[in-house]
Image (spheres, rainbow, N blue to C red):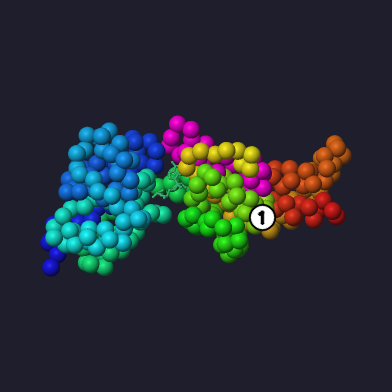
Amino acid sequence: MADAGGILVVCATPIGNLGDVTLRVLDALRAADVIAAEDTRVTRKLLSRYEIHTPLEAYHEHNRAAKTPELVSRIERGERIALVSDAGTPGISDPGEHLVDACLDAGLRVDVLPGPSAIVTALVASGLPTGAFYFGGFLPRKTGERERAIALLSALDATLVFYESPGRTAATLTSLAGAFAGRRAAVARELTKLHEEVARGEIGQLADDFAARELKGEVVVLIGPPVASAQLTLDEDVVRERVRDAMTAGVSRRDAVRDVAAELGLPRNEVYRLALE
Ligand code: SAM
């Protein structure tokens, strides 16, 4: 039978700025018998900033199979274990979800202390619609698998949010531009840190911009919902006029279509169709 004092306390920690931690989380980290941390070096910086001396143990993707049952039985015996990830809320795209699931299955008490997560920070910082959003975690690395995963999302009437590594951001933007031409998009990078950047624009334009960049830091990629077809009908005359003006000024049809699609937030293939009429 579980000792009534045992508990797993899931603690959200900063996604960059060490000031973004709640008072409850600091109290929980101090009161814990041990802190299970995804990366003990990262967590040590937070603990030293707030003068917390609780012992740390690693809990990550590579040791979770063995470590999960061990932590569960220690909580059953009455230990108070705080769980933190590298950044943000444990359980969101990191191994925390397995420990929470195992503790709940064992009938143990789990408290979740809310705080930062890159999903919500990026969503709000992007300025894209927040009424409905879909979080897709990390897209597959292989191009074919990634494009199949993206194609399944094309009809969703929601802002799409993906985590990404800096090295794969350009390839992911290219795949997204292929499926979602004309949609508004954003790349939110290094949120809450010194080099924070939120780049916004039509997805094809953003893919072109980021193709030439060597990115560093942490990245969230966001795509706005599909453009309403009613809006397309309303803007048809404007679209034709803008393309005609650009071509009269010497811009090629291809570039005129790309620029007008980006400016009006419309799919390139729709603008192209109108340009041909
Ligand atoms: N548990 C974390 C959370 O709640 O946000 C996410 C962990 S996941 C392994 C790490 C990913 O989160 C990064 O690859 C990046 O996509 C995103 N991320 C974390 N911190 C970020 C930041 N400061 N700016 C932008 N993206 C960030």
Number of numbered discs on residues: 1
Q: Is residue 100 visible?
A: no
Find out if the beta carbon at label 1 lies less than 8 Å from the nearest ligand 1 atom.
no
**Res 227 → quadrant:** bottom right
Instruction: Name the element at disc 1.
Output: helix
Q: Is residue 19 left or right of residue 172?
A: left
Where residue 106 appears, x then y in whole percent?
Answer: 23, 67
Query: How crowded is the residue under tag 1: few (<14 C-alpha within 10 Å), some, or many (20+)?
Result: some
Image point (37%, 45%), residue name: 87
Quadrant in which the N terminus appears: bottom left
Residue underneath mark 1? 178
Left or right of residue 48: residue 241 = right
Residue at 23% x, 45% y: name it: 56
Q: Residue at x 60, y 50 (%)?
A: 171
User: In this rendering, would 40 be left or right of 241?
Assistant: left
Q: Image quarter for residue 205?
A: top right
Q: Is residue 86 visible?
A: yes
Spot the residue most to the top.
194
Front-lying residue, 234 or 184: 184
Q: Is residue 194 magenta?
A: yes
Please provide the residue range marked out in magenta: 187-209
- Residue 218, given in percent of the width and then of the height, sits at 47, 42
Residue 105: percent from the left, percent from the top? 26, 68
When the figure is inspected, residue 40 is found, relative to residue 226, above or below; the finding is above
Q: Residue 125: x, y in percent?
A: 50, 42
Q: Amino acid at mark 1?
A: Gly
Depth check, front residue: 123 or 53: 53
Judge whether residue 191 is colored magenta.
yes
Residue 263 falls in image quadrant: top right
Location of the C terminus (image quadrant): bottom right
